[in-house]
Image (spheres, rainbow, N blue to C red):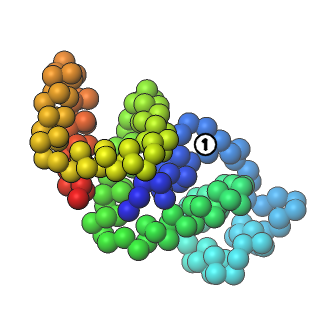
């Protein structure tokens, strides 16, 4: 599964300010609601589900739905497409995606910035350069050399060293 398919939702989830949406009340003057606080313009399928939810869960759902509605249509379309890809994954693949998203979420702001800079550099590479790098990553000797060099460079920062080595282990498992 290509990371590029998940990039828009990943950016929305973890780039500071991407979800900078002002909270709004569920019912507004242009969007009347029923006695349970469910907006009248909620699609029937979602209205049914919402009616069965406990009040606290309903309130959270409606808050998120309001945020979703404020996203530009092209962002919503990409997120829906990404979700469809996610649903087609095996449980193991889904768990791996969740684990990687959690790792990204737990990164410091500086590490996130570096990650996205590297991702941008990867996307700017020509297909030939990407293929050459993929071939190197599939070479067990390359991986061993990379691990040795990383250990030397990060020997004074154990936490960063373990994060990088774990990421390399993931790359080794997914490499052809």
Q: Is residue 139 above or below residue 52?
A: above
Quarter of the rendering containing residue 28: bottom right
For mark 1, what is the residue?
Answer: 18
| 110 sits to left or right of 139 | right
Q: Residue furthest right?
A: 29
What residue is drawn where x is 63% and y is 64%? 77
Q: Quadrant of the C terminus?
A: bottom left
Q: Label 1: how many residues lie within 10 Å, few (<14), some (14-19) or many (20+)?
A: few
Q: Give the image location of residue 153, x and y in percent.
A: 21, 21
Q: Give the image location of residue 149, x and y in percent.
A: 17, 27
Q: Is residue 33 above or below residue 74?
A: below
Residue 165 visible in this rendered orientation of the protein: yes
Q: Secondary structure at mark 1?
A: loop
Q: Residue furthest front?
A: 128
Q: 163 or 140, which is in the foreground? A: 140
Q: 36 or 104, which is in the foreground? A: 104
Q: Give the image location of residue 3, x and y in percent.
A: 42, 54
Q: Give the image location of residue 71, x and y in percent.
A: 69, 55
Q: 38 or 155, which is in the foreground? A: 155
């Amino acid at each position: 599964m290509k990371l590029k398919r998940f990039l828009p939702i990943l950016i929305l989830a973890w780039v500071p300010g991407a979800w900078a949406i002002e909270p709004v009340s569920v019912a507004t003057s242009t969007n009347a609601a029923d006695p349970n606080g469910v907006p009248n313009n909620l699609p029937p399928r979602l209205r049914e589900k919402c009616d069965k939810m406990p009040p606290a869960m309903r309130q959270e759902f409606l808050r998120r739905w309001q945020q979703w509605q404020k996203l530009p249509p092209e962002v919503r379309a990409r997120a829906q497409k990404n979700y469809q890809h996610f649903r087609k994954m095996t449980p193991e693949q889904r768990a791996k995606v969740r684990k990687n998203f959690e790792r990204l979420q737990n990164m410091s702001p500086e590490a996130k910035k570096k990650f996205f800079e590297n991702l941008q550099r990867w996307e700017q590479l020509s297909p030939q350069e990407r293929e050459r790098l993929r071939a190197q990553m599939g070479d067990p000797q390359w991986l061993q050399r990379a691990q040795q060099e990383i250990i030397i460079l990060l020997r004074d920062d154990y936490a960063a060293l373990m994060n990088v080595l774990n990421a390399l282990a993931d790359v080794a498992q997914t490499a052809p």
